[in-house]
Amino acid sequence: MSLFLSSFINKIDVKGRVSVPAQFRAAVNNDEFAGVVLYRQYAPNCIGGVSMARMEQIANNADTHGTNSKTDALFAEARQMAFDITGRIIIPKDLLKHAGIKDKAIFVGRGNSFQIWNPETFQKTLKLNKEQNNNIC
């Protein structure tokens, strides 16, 4: 399984279509499902994303260790989003609203997963986190 690395800002059209960064598409290239899985993330309000292979790993782990409310919520809200021929997905309107995303989105790699944010919100959160980390001695 490849990793999701780096950050990329892409435009979203009026239908909610956005091009998934080529590096992120390459990270799921070997999966049987040609797309990604999206879900709501809370605190911070953004959209989480993983490959189908990662979802299968989470499911297998849940089967072995029992489910919990966090895993149950993940599977209940997960949406399979297939790539179109140009590498775009349609982000559902309720997820866009949840994350406050309008015309641009930033894809942020997190290793085995990624997040999709409103770029301005992400920059503010990143700045706040840096300031808080600088105050710790």
Image: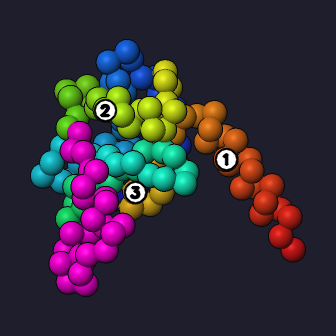
What distance separates the C-alpha of mark 3 from that of mark 1?
A: 18 Å
Quick check: 107 above or below 97? Answer: below
* Residue drawn at point x = 20 percent, y = 38 percent: 82
**Within 10 Å of the Cα at label 3, are there few (<14), some (14-19), or many (20+) other Cα atoms?**
some
Measuring from the top left, give residue 22's x and y in whole percent.
36, 38
Badge nearest the viewer, 2 or 3? 2
Element class at badge 3: loop
Q: Nearer the viewer, residue 46 or 108?
A: 46
Secondary element at image label 1: helix
Residue bounds of the magenta highlight: 57-81
Per the image, the residue denoted by label 2 is 92
Question: Can you say which quadrant of the picture contains the C terminus?
Answer: bottom right
Q: Are marks 3 and 1 in contact (CB under 8 Å)?
A: no
In the image, taking residue 39 as reference, residue 5 lies left or right, namely: right
Q: Can residue 5 be seen from the camera position used here?
A: no
Q: Residues within 10 Å of mark 1 (few under 14, many from 20)?
A: few
Relative to 33, is 133 on the left or the right?
Answer: right
Pointer 2: residues within 10 angstroms few (<14), some, or many (20+)? Answer: some
Left of 125 or right of it: where is 9? Answer: left
Quadrant in the picture for residue 58 = bottom left
On the image, numbered disc 1 is attached to which residue? 125
Q: Main secondary structure of the magenta part?
A: helix
In the picture, the quarter occupied by the N terminus is: bottom left
Disc 2, SS: loop
Q: In the image as oriented, which residue stretches furthest toward the front?
A: 69
Tell me whether circle 2 and circle 3 mark residues in contact (CB < 8 Å).
no
| Residue 76 in magenta stretch | yes
Q: Position of residue 4 (x, y in %)?
A: 42, 53
What amino acid is labelled 2 in the image?
A: Pro
Q: Which residue is mark 3?
A: 113
Q: Name the amino acid, label 1.
A: Thr
Q: Residue furthest top?
A: 14
